Structures are given as C-alpha cells and as structure tokens.
Image (cartoon, helix red, strand yellow):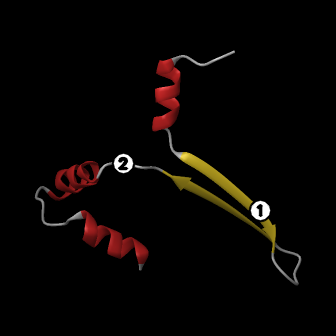
C-alpha cells in the first residue's frame, strides 16, 4: 500500500521526533531524551518576532545566540 502524494508532502512538513534511552554509567538511572527537529525558513521566525515585538529589531541570528547559551 502506497501513500498519496498529498500525504507524503504532509509528512515531510511534520517535525522529526527522535527519542533516546540509555542507562547512566555506574548508577541506577536511565536518561530519556526526546529531540524534536523542525525546519522552517528564516523568514518564518522573523515574522514571528516582528509580530510579538511590533517591530523588526531582533533578528534570527541574535535569537540563535540566546538559545545556544
């Protein structure tokens, strides 16, 4: 059974969700990580910032610096 082209395009736009489970060395703990990856054009985030700030002073580059720190 194959998927329609419309369904395939819809799936490509969805975020990629990865999960990792591992045991922490020398302990009885388990580390469960969930990573959500979503690719959007820069213009999308600039529009979001513009809408929330009412002006375009904050650029995506400065947002990325804040997230990385």
Q: Nearer the viewer, residue 52 or 22?
A: 22
First reached walking from the N terminus: tag 1 or tag 2: 1
Q: Which residue is mark 2?
A: 40
Q: In the picture provided, is 11 more to the left or to the right than 27?
A: left
Q: Is residue 44 above or below residue 66?
A: above
x, y percent for residue 12: 49, 35
Residue at the far bottom: name it: 26
**Quarter of the figure that contains the C terminus:** bottom left
| Secondary structure category for the residue under label 1 | strand
* Quarter occupied by residue 46: bottom left
| Secondary structure category for the residue under label 2 | loop
**Quarter of the figure that contains the N terminus:** top right
Q: CA distance from mark 1 to mark 2?
A: 27 Å
In this rendering, which labeled residue sits more in front, label 1 or label 2? 2
Residue at left offset 88%, top offset 84%? 26
Residue at left offset 83%, top offset 74%? 29
Q: Nearer the viewer, residue 21 or 3?
A: 3
x, y percent for residue 38: 46, 50
Residue 38's disc is none
Q: In the picture provided, is 66 more to the left or to the right than 35?
A: left
x, y percent for residue 11: 52, 32
x, y percent for residue 65: 33, 75
Q: In the picture provided, is 28 more to the left or to the right than 8?
A: right
Residue at left offset 60%, top offset 49%? 17
Residue at the far left: name it: 55
Q: Which residue is mark 1?
A: 21
Number of callouts: 2
């Amino acid at each position: 059974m194959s998927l329609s082209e419309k369904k395939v395009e819809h799936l490509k736009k969805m975020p990629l969700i990865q999960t990792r489970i591992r045991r922490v060395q020398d302990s009885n703990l388990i580390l469960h990580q969930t990573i959500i990856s979503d690719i959007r054009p820069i213009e999308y985030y600039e529009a979001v910032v513009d809408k929330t700030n009412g002006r375009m002073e904050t650029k995506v580059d400065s947002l990325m610096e804040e997230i990385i720190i």
